Image (spheres, rainbow, N blue to C red):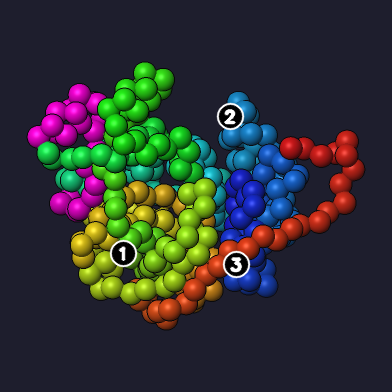
């Protein structure tokens, strides 16, 4: 069984976990556009590839899949997920399963307003969103919503260009400066994260890990503690199975006055996944099982509460001649 991890970057732990779950004849292959991406050195083999906007990028990846007899492929960065999901049939033609949800779902995940509409359609609590500032201002005058609010790009990731806004004046400045913005209700509550794996054969949730976020940095969880709540398990299960997600996804949730609100969905391994794995939620093993054509059992909630994760810095040291460095 050969697995290809695209855009491995600094996600060393994810590569290491797949390596740990490898069988004797399994192989983990990684790619990146830089040979200073430390995670590629934890793989059995790595390829230096162009950036994903290169016109030959897809063909290069498909050639790697053919050359290495790749059984499954996944990416660790948002911009690439739509690309490989959209070309799912091209990968299937060379014998490779794309471990990413369907293209339409990926696009909904990356369009925050479409995700808001989907959650409303399903009757799942979520924060109010507005595409038009005039609509927001009218609702504010009626007392439906109040400052502060978040103003953010409709499409974006890694918490980039998100602004907490507290006045009409700030709102006007941002809408004058930038296009394609939306206004989102400020969720003043406890934030949680959920790592969810949905069986790629049955479409049923296989496992789920929920963590209470204690400290965040640059949009990622720095410190967290594992928790369990059957209400939240049921809410997430209803959401992902109704939508038709497959594979690994990462969900952000807020709890306000005892009510859970789904905020955002990332259709990939989240940055806090190491917490789940180290607590016994073994998604790489489930992916290998699905790639072998085997269904996975439901193990939701089979982990301990009170397991804490604390991220810290590490380094990778390699000898590379200066003229050979690709940034």
Q: Which residue bears the numbered disc 3?
A: 17
How many marks do you count on the picture?
3
Mark 3 and mark 1 in contact? Answer it, CB < 8 Å.
no
State the SS at label 2.
Answer: loop
Pointer 3 local density, CA inside 10 Å: few below 14, some 14–19, many at least 20: some
Pointer 1 local density, CA inside 10 Å: few below 14, some 14–19, many at least 20: many
- What segment carries the magenta color? 122-142
Quarter of the image for residue 209 reads: bottom left
Q: Residue 316: where, in percent of width, then height?
A: 76, 57
Q: Which residue is located at x 67 percent, y 60 percent?
A: 313
Does the image show residue 277? no
Q: Residue 320: where, in percent of width, then height?
A: 86, 47
Q: Which residue is located at x 35 percent, y 28 percent?
A: 170
Q: Is residue 35 left or right of residue 234?
A: right
Viewer-closest of 319 and 103: 319
Which mark is drawn over residue 248?
none
Q: Earlier in the sequence, mark 1 or mark 2?
A: 2
Judge whether 62 appears above or below 300 on screen.
Answer: above
Quarter of the image for residue 251 reads: bottom left
Q: Which residue bears the numbered disc 2?
A: 53
Q: CA distance from mark 3 to mark 1?
A: 23 Å
Q: Is residue 256 magenta?
A: no
Which mark is drawn over residue 204?
1
Judge whether 56 appears above or below 147 on screen.
Answer: above
State the SS at label 1.
Answer: loop
Q: Which residue is located at x 23 percent, y 49 percent?
A: 126
Viewer-closest of 48 and 35: 35
């Amino acid at each position: 069984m050969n697995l290809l991890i695209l855009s491995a970057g600094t996600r060393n732990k994810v590569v290491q976990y797949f390596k740990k779950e490898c069988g004797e004849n399994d192989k983990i292959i990684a790619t990146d556009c830089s040979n200073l991406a430390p995670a590629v050195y934890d793989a059995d083999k790595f390829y230096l590839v162009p950036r994903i906007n290169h016109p030959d990028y897809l063909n290069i990846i498909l050639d790697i899949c053919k050359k290495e007899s790749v059984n499954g492929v996944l990416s660790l960065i948002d911009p690439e997920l739509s690309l490989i999901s959209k070309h799912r049939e091209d990968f299937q033609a060379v014998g490779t399963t794309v471990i990413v949800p369907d293209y339409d779902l990926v696009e909904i995940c990356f369009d925050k307003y479409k995700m808001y509409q989907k959650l409303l359609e399903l009757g799942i609590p979520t924060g109010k969103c507005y595409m038009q500032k005039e609509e927001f201002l009218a609702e504010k005058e009626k007392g439906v919503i109040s400052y502060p609010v978040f103003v953010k790009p409709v499409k974006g990731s890694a918490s980039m260009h998100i602004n907490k806004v507290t006045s009409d004046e700030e709102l006007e400045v941002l809408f004058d400066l930038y296009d394609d913005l939306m206004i989102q209700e400020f969720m003043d509550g406890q934030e949680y994260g959920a790592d969810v794996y949905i069986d790629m054969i049955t479409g049923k949730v296989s496992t789920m890990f929920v963590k209470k976020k204690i400290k965040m940095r640059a949009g990622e969880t720095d410190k967290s503690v594992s928790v369990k709540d059957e209400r939240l398990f049921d809410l997430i299960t209803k959401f992902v199975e109704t939508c038709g997600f497959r594979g690994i996804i990462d969900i952000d949730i807020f709890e306000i006055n005892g009510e859970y609100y789904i905020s955002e969905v990332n259709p990939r391994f989240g940055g806090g996944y190491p917490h789940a794995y180290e607590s016994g939620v073994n998604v790489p093993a489930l992916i290998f099982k699905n790639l072998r054509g085997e269904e996975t059992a439901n193990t939701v909630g089979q982990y301990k509460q009170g397991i804490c994760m604390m991220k810290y810095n590490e380094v990778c040291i390699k000898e590379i001649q200066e003229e050979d460095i690709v940034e």
